[in-house]
Image (cartoon, rainbow, N blue to C red):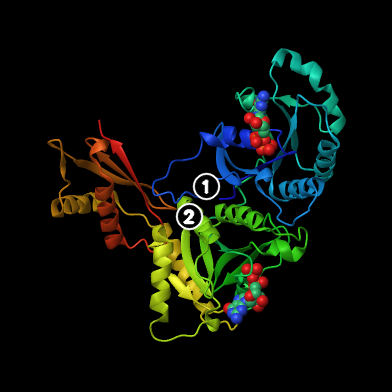
Amino acid sequence: MSKPVVAIVGRPNVGKSTLFNRIAGGLVAIVENKPGVTRDRLYRDAEWLGRKFALIDTGGIEFKAEGTPIASQMRKQAEIAVEEADVVILVVDAQLAPTPDDDLIARTLRRSGKPVLLAANKVEDFEKAEGQLYDFLALGLGEAIPISAVHGMNMGDLLDMVVSNLPENAGEDYDPDVIRISVIGRPNVGKSSLVNNMLGRERVIVSNIPGTTRDAIDTPFEYEGKHYILIDTAGMRRKGRIEELTEQYSVVRSLHAVDRSDVILMLLDATEGVTEQDKKIAGYAHDAGKAIVIVVNKWDLVEKDDKTINKFEKTIREELGFLQYAPTMFISAKTGQRVHKILELVDFVTEQNSTRVTTATLNTLVREWLHLNPPPTDKGRRLKVLYLTQASVKPPTFVFFVNDPELMHFSYKRYLENQMRKHFGFEGTPIRIIIRQKD
Ligand code: GDP
Ligand code: GDP
């Protein structure tokens, strides 16, 4: 589902990352088996008054090009904020007068026409703050909202403003009959080549209706009567709006694309294997509950014998341990080898991701599983599963009502998950298991 994005910008040391942690800190959903992914300051989920949004700290995006002056770094960060976000928070230091750098960022933001909130951070005395903040009117962004990120003061006011500026219809452009596919991977892995190859195929009908989707890099198309949208995270660079696509920025873009997709095509380079960045993005997609296909590209460059595919598979399973369920494909975006098979697999994992199992079936099966391998006792007590039901799809989420959640050990939970996969497949989709106390 398309989730609105809020970006934090500002000079170094004004308190951006403190604010980021304050807003996103306590609100991240705790998901087990987290490969330690969503913990950095680039992109995180947050929620206020029931509105969910993604938060980006542009200060976490570094531009590696040496000697880039601070001013031009900040301008770039502001451009990214404008490009990505629905609402921008410009943070300034209330203890200092506005600086030329504040002014420079403010100018970039004003030109964008996006809603911009000015947050004056490091306020110690809120009674006196009002008088101190007049100077910031000169930035042309209206009145500053006094906050203290460190002490968590006035966060409610700021977040109320954030939420009231989020686009009303975020998420409403989402048509459940359209499958959204994003092609994710490091720069140069072959994303654009794959997108071009997929869209250039016979019988793929690209619709050119402007305004069908929110983002210009989304391409709606039709294949065998079914509707898809291809989200191309490399498209940005081609448009040349921000030439310098750093690794970190491409991660931000990718995470955003993951949020908006049903299916992730996780592209790996056959000549390079799995990188840290790949793990990070795959981990995020896993946590987000998306259907995933691992696509190994540039297969034409690999010298092969009859064991090569197996070896590759093994490496992928080792490196991306949490993605045991994701099917793999070996393709060449350049020669087109096996590209025609991708949509078939996309359809399949989408179905798996939306599978619904009846409560009756689940309860019959769970009795069998418990009988087959009874839970171990813990201090003389044994886990009882009283009832099992599926709470949602995308991803399939199951709630086990038990006598005492403490008695559900990790290994037993894994056993139950394995049984579920054995029966229902769930290929290409994460599943979630929630344990609840039954009163
Ligand atoms: P960034 O570079 O903009 O991300 O700034 P940081 O979040 O790293 O903060 C820079 C410094 O300002 C740190 O020493 C913070 O502890 C401090 N700081 C952040 N928020 C506040 C605040 O509300 N009040 C005060 N007094 N200091 C703060
Ligand atoms: P992106 O940055 O992920 O969009 O990658 P591109 O699609 O721009 O591809 C990067 C480079 O890899 C280009 O020179 C492509 O021609 C090349 N490339 C992409 N896919 C393949 C492939 O399957 N085989 C070979 N040999 N080269 C490829």
Which amino acid type corresponds to the residue marked 1 in the rendered image?
Thr
Image position, residue 184 (x, y; %) = 57, 63
Determine the image quadrant of residue 20: top right
Task: Find the residue positioned furthest to the front.
Answer: 67
Residue receiving disc 2: 283
Image position, residue 340 (x, y; %) = 53, 78
- Label 1 packing within 10 angstroms: few (<14), some (14-19), many (20+): some
Is 424 above or below relative to 412? Answer: below
Task: Find the residue positioned furthest to the top.
Answer: 127
Q: 303 and 346: which one is in front?
A: 303
* Mark 2 secondary-structure assignment: helix
* Mark 1 secondary-structure assignment: loop
Residue receiving disc 1: 38
Q: 169 and 309: which one is in front?
A: 309
Q: Is residue 339 left or right of residue 128?
A: left
Q: Is mark 2 within 8 Å of ligand 2?
A: no
Image position, residue 236 (x, y; %) = 71, 61
Q: Residue at x 50, y 59 (%)?
A: 279
Ligand 2: quadrant of the figure: bottom right
Q: Is residue 292 left or right of residue 236?
A: left
Circles 2 and 1 in contact, beta carbons < 8 Å: yes
Give residue 23's mark. none
Image position, residue 373 (x, y; %) = 16, 53
The CA distance from mark 2 to mark 1 is 8 Å
Q: Is residue 196 left or right of residue 426?
A: right
Question: Could one spot residue 256 in this view of the protein?
Answer: yes
Q: Is mark 1 within 8 Å of ligand 1?
A: no
Determine the image quadrant of residue 129: top right
Is 390 above or below relative to 203? Answer: above
Q: Residue at x 64, y 61 (%)?
A: 233
- Label 2 packing within 10 angstroms: few (<14), some (14-19), many (20+): many
Which amino acid type corresponds to the residue marked 2 in the rendered image?
Gly
